[in-house]
DNA sequence: ACGGTTTTGAACCGTTTAGTTCTATACGAT
DNA sequence: ATCGTATAGAACTAAACGGTTCAAAACCGT
């Protein structure tokens, strides 16, 4: 029986994620990660294969925690869920602005294929859940068509959260967008 | 009178920009830039103060060239221009996918304030031009409200261009979005 | 106390980075 | 041809990088 670990994998992910979120993969150094997590390099390397592995684990951790919010599965399904998703989906917690996944889409050129897969998989799920909510409202337009439009708009809202004013105008925009959607 | 330069500033910007666009600021090295431009480091440093200066110059160069396209100033102003902007605004030229400015919004945490200023300035202009086109259609909803919604949707379309399937579904989405807008 | 094991922490390693320096080259003017 | 100047190219620099190694520390069992 050896010396006990003084960190948990979960803790490391919780603490590393905001750093990757804010700075991106390329501009987040192992030293940044050491500082954020309070775990030194050899500790990190016992838990993760390399920097990419840690990034991927953070991304998956993030996607799982977002899924758990269940914004699009609340009964009754409908426009209300769509509105909640658009207003509360992009985060606004300190330096956690917008969406780590959407921000990471910019870095696909340098991220591992698994990151691409995780994000596209999550988007497919979101689109499906959006479509279920839209279907419940019985619009004239195909629910899947509306769903993909909503997802694009959501993506735009998220990337805009990188602006200082990103949150300020968001709710109004969502209200206006909902007005437009209800006409379809 | 010394030895003549065998590159122009313009050429360097044209060649460096796609590299920054694809890889981002942080993951683009001086060596990458040397290779892309065919100009070696001391050449680049005679023309630009540092890497940030070159990035900023590329960004400005990009924004200017996008403005020159005049997608939103064609007469007669109206929905047609909005549609053209949404369909043709995000680029689809080899590795130049989407929008260099939108992609760069993810990197504000590490980019100079001037980059932030250039992008927000350009967005303000786009929003204004969008509003003029919308105004010409005399909608019931405030043109500025519709304009900012369009800009968010555009931003979403651009970030989605980082997906392999980004272009494929875009036109249909724009058509559907235009249907929604015309109801406002 | 000792031994075995695992973790922490510090040092190490080779490579890469942005930026600097310096020499050889290429030009125009005389 | 020579001189002065500016550029291209190569070498250099200190620091940073991701990952590795190894010694000290912390645990449990005997």
Image: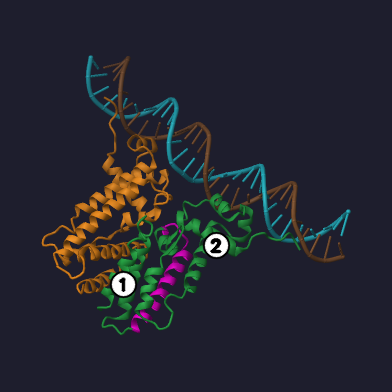
Chain colours: A orange, B green, C brown, D cyan
Instruction: Give the residue pinned by disc 2.
Output: B14
Subunit ID for the residue under disc 1: B
**Pointers 2 and 1 in contact (CB under 8 A)?**
no
Instruction: Give the residue pinned by disc 1.
Output: B149
Considering depth in this image, is D1 or B97 the residue closer to the camera?
Answer: B97
- Decide if residue A8 is on the left or right side of residue B12: left
State the residue at coordinates (27%, 47%).
A61
Subunit ID for the residue under disc 2: B
Tell me residue A69's x, y (percent): 19, 55
Query: Which corner quadrant holds the N terminus of chain A?
Result: top left
Q: Earlier in the sequence, mark 2 or mark 1?
A: 2
Tell me which segment is drawn in magenta. B107-136
For this orientation, the residue located farthest to the left is A76
- Decide if residue B153 is on the left or right side of residue A78: right
Magenta stretch, overall SS: helix
Mark seen at residue B141: none
Q: Is residue B101 above or below residue A183?
A: above
Tell me residue B33's x, y (percent): 55, 53
State the residue at coordinates (30%, 73%).
B178
Q: Is residue A176 above or below residue D29?
A: below
Q: What secondary structure is found at the residue carrying circle 1?
A: helix
Residue B124 part of the magenta segment: yes
Q: Residues within 10 Å of mark 2 (few under 14, many from 20)?
A: some
Q: Is residue B57 above or below residue A14?
A: below
Tell me residue B121's x, y (percent): 44, 72
Considering depth in this image, is B77 or A15 the residue closer to the camera?
Answer: B77
């Amino acid at each position: 029986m050896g010396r006990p670990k003084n960190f948990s994998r979960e803790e490391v992910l919780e603490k590393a994620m905001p750093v990757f979120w804010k700075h991106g993969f390329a501009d987040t150094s192992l030293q940044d990660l050491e500082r954020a997590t309070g775990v030194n390099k050899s500790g990190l390397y016992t838990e993760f294969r390399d920097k990419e592995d840690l990034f991927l684990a953070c991304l998956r951790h993030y996607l799982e925690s977002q899924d758990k919010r269940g914004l699009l599965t609340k009964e009754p399904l409908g426009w209300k869920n769509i509105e909640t998703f658009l207003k509360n989906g992009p985060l606004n917690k300190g330096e956690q602005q917008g969406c780590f996944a959407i921000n990471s889409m910019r870095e696909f050129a340098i991220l591992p294929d698994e990151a691409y897969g995780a994000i596209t998989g999550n988007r497919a799920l979101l689109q499906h859940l959006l479509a279920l909510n839209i279907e419940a409202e019985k619009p004239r337009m195909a629910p899947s068509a509306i769903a993909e439009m909503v997802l694009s708009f959501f993506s735009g809202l998220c990337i805009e959260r990188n602006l200082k004013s990103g949150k300020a105008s968001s709710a109004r925009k969502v209200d206006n967008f909902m007005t437009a959607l209800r006409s379809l």
